[in-house]
Structure formats: structure tokens, C-alpha cells
């Protein structure tokens, strides 16, 4: 029965490696449960690597009288359980050692017959990094690429929202229980992912977002992906951990170049120095992935459906002067030589149209 597999998968601190060893020895979670009471403990200890502490952890888990109740509650929440020996466990993960014994899933898992790309980067990203993450995720998703990320603030969340808005699918890998939305600010994205893709975690239901869970989470992100795109990364960054794991898995890594003065581009430049591909444009990336025809079709569709906003001549001049890096009102006044009142009116108009935003007091960037 699946609830016995659910029970066995959730035993802590029994490692995934030992769980696989025990299950392959006894055949099922139910048999392991039965053996606790039908045979002597020394029988377990004959299995190489299984310790007295491991046996006690299993016994303690067996004393939980609420397993059925917890399992039914998870099913009622739409949570699925997928273990490594089941047909729908991701085939991409089976290729690498050290992958999870089981996953907890809301929504779907990435389709096996469609390409996938991880888009990862800094939580406290720059407007430039966010803009490029959105651009790449949007076009890749429109071309049929599934976007994988960690549902974090910054680059991750921006890329996943863009993929969904482009009509594609995205999948969030959590460093906490599948029923825990972290960060809380991403509740809307959490709900959207369960409909337009899926959410998955190796952590048991209810597990909080502990710091030690996130490096392990990153190996699943890279494992599910055909390519890994690093949009922004500081010197010590979780994105670089993902890139390192992707390298060990033999994945192609691409990094976004940025200003040499930006602390959030240091990690990307180091990856490029080490041989990572350079992200020039979504089209070029899709061509390297062998998806040029999909890109061309997606671009034609985007251009047909695009509702271009008409701007006045002076609005165009102001918009063209504002880039992806913050520019002050004082600088705009000196560059454009508009009266202050007129420039402020145009800036407000562009902000209302959603073309620019005021990043901080009197500093503007493109939206």
C-alpha cells in the first residue's frame, strides 16, 4: 500500500541510500514495517551499513499512530507521493547518484519529452538581471521549454512568472515541505505553479525551510534541467552551487554577462572564465539547443499578438533616455533640457503606462 511507502520515505534521519538498500532487500515499505515486529533486530543489522541507530529511527517512526491520518490529509490537499521505484519518478533524476528517495508533488512533474532549462540567480537582483531573466524565460517558455527554478525572491520568481505569462509551464523545487509556501510573498506564484506546471520537494510534508535544505534542493533543480542559466550571482551564491552540481551532472551552463562593477555579476563572469556559455540572446540559446524552428514560430506569434503602445514624441525621447540601470531626475533634466514640470509630467505618464518605474526617490528605470 502506498501509505506504507509514504511512511517509510518520511523517516528521519535515515538516509536515502539506506532507505533504498532496505527497500531493495525487503521489497516494500509494508514489508519493512512488518519485519520490525516479526523478526529479531539482528536481522536488520546483517544489512551492511544499517546501524542500531537506524533501526531505532524506524521503530520510532512505526510508533506514529497518525500515519493514516497524515497521509489522507496530504492527499486531500492534492499532494502526490512519487518514489524512485515508481513509473512517474522523473527519468532525468534516475541518471544521477544521490537523488531523492521520493518526491512530494503538487500539480505535475516536468514532461519527459520536452526540453527543460533552469533559470537561477540572485534574490536581491538588479533591474538588469530581472529584466533579462524575464526576457529569456518568456521566450524559452513560448518556444516550449519548461522552466525550472526555486520559487525564491528575485530572479527565480521573476523567471517563473514570465514563463507562465507566456503560456508555458514552470516547476518550482522547494527547500521545505510541499505544503509550506516559502517565501510567503510568493503565494500567488505558488498557486499558479500548481496549475501551470508543478511544485515538488524531497522534504516531508510540514518541514520548515531550514538553511541546510537549500543546497540539496539545488541538485534537484540542476538534475531536472537540460541546461542551467545563471542570470546574476555574487561571489558566494546558491546559484553557483547549482552551477557546480550541474557541472558534476554534465549539464551545459550559461551565464549572463553584466557590468564589471556589479557585485552580482562577479559569479557569472567567473563561470564564463571557466568555460560557461555566454547568454547573448534567447534566440541564440534556442538555436544552440536545436530549437530554432520553435523560436521562430514563437516570435511570429508574439509579434502578431503584441499590442504596441503609441507614445508621443517627447515621451519617446524620455523613454529612450532611461535604461535598465537607475537614472536620476537631475541627470535626465541635464540630458533632455526639458522644463522640470514637463519632464515630471512625462515621467508620470510613462509610469502609468507601465513602461518605467521609480526605483527610489527620483531615480527611474525601465519596467
Image: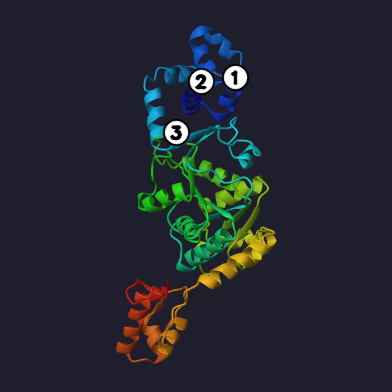
Disc 1 target residue: 27
3D distance between C-alphas at marks 3 and 2: 18 Å
Q: Position of residue 53 (x, y in %)?
A: 49, 19
Left or right of residue 23, residue 210 in this image: left
Badge 3 or badge 2: first in the primary sequence: 2
* Nearest to the observer: residue 330 or residue 200: 200
Q: Residues within 10 Å of mark 1 (few under 14, many from 20)?
A: few
Badge 3 or badge 1: first in the primary sequence: 1
Callout 1: helix, strand or loop? loop
* Nearest to the observer: residue 13 or residue 305: 305
The image shows residue 8, relative to residue 287, as above or below, that is: above
Q: Which mark is residue 59?
A: none
| Residue 291 quadrant | bottom right
Q: Residues within 10 Å of mark 2 (few under 14, many from 20)?
A: many
Callout 2: helix, strand or loop? helix
3D distance between C-alphas at marks 2 and 1: 18 Å
Disc 3 target residue: 204
Q: Position of residue 126 (x, y in %)?
A: 46, 65
Q: Which mark is residue 54?
A: 2
Residue 169: in sight, yes or no? yes
Q: Position of residue 289 (x, y in %)?
A: 67, 58
Badge 2 or badge 1: first in the primary sequence: 1
- Report the mark closest to the observer, 3 or 1: 1
Left or right of residue 141, residue 272 in this image: right
3D distance between C-alphas at marks 3 and 1: 22 Å
Q: Residues within 10 Å of mark 3 (few under 14, many from 20)?
A: many
Q: Position of residue 309 (x, y in %)?
A: 44, 78
Amino acid at each position: 500500500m502506498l501509505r506504507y511507502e509514504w511512511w517509510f520515505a518520511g523517516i528521519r534521519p535515515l538516509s536515502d541510500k539506506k532507505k533504498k538498500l532496505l527497500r531493495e532487500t525487503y521489497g516494500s515499505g509494508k514489508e519493512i514495517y512488518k519485519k520490525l515486529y516479526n523478526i529479531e533486530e539482528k536481522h536488520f543489522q546483517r544489512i551492511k551499513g544499517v546501524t542500531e541507530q537506524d533501526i531505532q529511527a524506524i521503530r520510532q517512526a512505526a510508533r506514529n499512530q497518525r500515519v493514516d491520518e497524515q497521509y489522507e490529509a496530504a492527499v486531500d490537499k492534492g499532494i502526490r507521493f512519487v518514489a524512485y521505484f515508481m513509473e512517474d519518478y522523473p527519468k532525468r533524476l534516475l541518471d544521477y547518484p544521490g537523488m531523492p528517495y521520493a518526491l512530494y508533488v503538487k500539480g505535475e512533474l516536468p514532461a519527459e519529452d520536452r526540453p527543460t532549462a533552469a533559470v537561477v540567480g540572485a534574490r536581491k537582483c538588479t533591474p538588469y538581471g530581472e529584466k533579462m531573466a524575464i526576457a529569456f524565460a518568456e521566450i524559452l517558455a513560448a518556444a516550449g521549454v519548461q522552466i525550472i527554478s526555486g520559487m525564491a525572491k528575485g530572479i527565480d520568481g521573476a523567471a517563473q512568472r514570465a514563463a507562465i505569462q507566456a503560456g508555458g509551464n514552470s516547476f518550482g523545487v522547494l527547500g521545505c515541505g510541499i505544503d509550506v509556501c516559502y517565501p510567503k510573498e510568493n503565494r500567488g506564484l505558488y498557486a499558479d505553479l500548481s496549475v501551470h506546471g508543478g511544485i515538488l520537494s524531497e522534504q516531508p510534508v510540514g518541514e520548515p525551510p531550514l538553511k541546510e535544505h537549500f543546497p540539496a534542493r539545488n541538485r534537484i533543480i540542476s538534475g531536472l534541467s537540460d541546461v542551467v542559466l545563471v542570470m546574476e550571482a555574487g561571489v558566494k551564491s546558491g546559484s553557483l552551487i547549482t552551477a557546480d552540481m550541474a557541472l558534476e551532472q554534465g549539464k551545459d551552463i550559461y551565464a549572463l554577462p553584466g557590468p564589471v562593477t556589479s557585485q552580482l555579476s562577479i559569479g557569472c563572469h567567473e563561470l564564463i572564465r571557466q568555460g560557461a556559455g555566454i547568454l547573448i540572446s534567447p534566440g541564440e540559446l534556442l538555436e544552440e539547443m536545436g530549437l530554432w524552428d520553435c523560436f521562430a514560430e514563437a516570435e511570429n506569434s508574439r509579434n502578431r499578438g503584441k499590442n504596441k503602445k503609441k507614445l508621443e514624441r517627447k515621451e519617446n525621447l524620455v523613454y529612450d533616455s532611461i535604461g535598465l540601470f537607475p537614472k536620476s531626475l537631475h541627470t535626465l533634466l541635464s540630458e533632455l533640457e526639458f522644463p522640470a514640470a514637463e519632464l515630471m509630467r512625462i515621467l508620470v505618464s510613462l509610469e502609468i503606462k507601465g513602461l518605467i518605474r521609480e526605483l527610489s526617490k527620483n531615480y527611474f528605470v525601465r519596467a
